[in-house]
Amino acid sequence: MIKRIVGIAALGLLSLQACMAQSTPSPRTATLHPYELDDFFKQEKLLDEQVELIYKSMTPEQRVGQMIVPAAGRLGKPDAELDELVRRGWIGGVLLLNGTTSSFKKYVHRFDSISQANSHLPLVYSADAEPSLINRKISDSQKVPKTSELKDTSEVIAVAHTIAHQLKDIGILYNYAPVTDLSLQNAAIGNRSFGSDPAQVERMNKAFILATQADGVAATAKHFPGHGLVQGDSHKKLVYIDGDMKEVGVYKGLIDAGVLSIMVGHIAVQNNPRYNTGGEPATLSRTIVTDLLKNEMGYKGIITTDAMNMGAVAAIPNASLKAAKAGIDMILMPLKEKETLFAILAEMDKDPAFKKQVEESVKKIIRFKLCLGVIR
């Protein structure tokens, strides 16, 4: 495994230890206390203090940059553009998209070196490492069965451990998996689903999530509020839930189980008076992201978009800003990272409530990185 232990000085936080020692006189405050993923949802005063101190040490651009996640690899941004984004501290993570173990390790080393040299918060690396996708996304990865081929939770757990160990060897600690959608028929989902029975899908998802997170890799339930029962493929066009959202119920059990991340899909909702999205994808809907997922369902983890370059959302003006205003924490593959960052900053200057919301998202991401062990 690539070691990514970053010291206080590398973060530009030379005063952090002294501040912590003054505010909480305890042996535990001599260094940044090591946390585990299980600590993310716990009430922990010292963790709160560490998050606050790191947040205060950052510039506004570094803070908002934590919300932005471009992709590297064969289908990602050009390397020179990524180098510049990392150098400026304008991103919080990188999706490693379509490559080999060796090429991804080189990216991790390269970007970590640039980030550390410029005293930025370390990046978190992510992957689309579902059982059905990992062998395509990481071409030389160990072969595993497709999601739909896994027969019981014991097989799911074994595959989840295999995937997590491979990701950690590269330096990837954030997996956009498992798929929670209820169908093997949808054009975008197919064999990526555990089936159409809600109880079965919840059981298999929970097994994958718990095994993955036990290995120190954050799991992601996707695609909220449900892509399995819609017609069409959101990679190509906007798709609609017509009426009741029949797939949302599966997420409640996964939230209770402690899933660290939920991905919102580019799925519109129509003919549902309470949850209509007004012809735009759920990713951009405050009704779905904040009112439903955060407030009604009580979700406190990291909420990420699906890729913002997909056909369902790419042509919508100011889509990434709209996603942030909806309540999204991390914006995956925005078309223009710099434009997104400064649009969010400008909106924060105009809207105190939005500014507070962004501050909460950034602090949540810092907490996420502390619990992943990215910041030490």
Image (cartoon, rainbow, N blue to C red):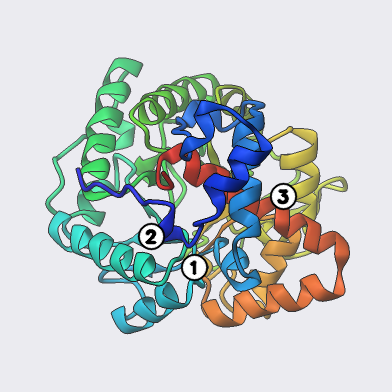
Q: Earlier in the sequence, mark 2 or mark 3?
A: 2
Where residue 91 is drawn, which disc sits there? 1
Mark 2: few/some/many CA within 10 Å (<14, 14-19, 20+)? many
Distance between mark 2 and mark 1 Cα atoms: 11 Å
Badge 1 amino acid: Ile
Examine the rendering and report whether any part of residue 262 can be seen.
Answer: no
Q: Residues within 10 Å of mark 1 (few under 14, many from 20)?
A: many
Asked if the residue under mark 3 is in contact with the one under mark 1, i.e. CB atoms within 8 Å, the reply is: no
Q: Secondary structure at mark 1?
A: loop
Q: Which residue is mark 3?
A: 289
Q: Nearer the viewer, mark 2 or mark 3?
A: 2
Q: Nearer the viewer, residue 158 or 235?
A: 158
Mark 1 vs mark 3, foreground winner is 1
**Which three-letter amino acid code belongs to the residue tagged 2?**
Leu
Residue 13: x, y in percent? Answer: 51, 57
| Numbered circle sitting on residue 95 | 2
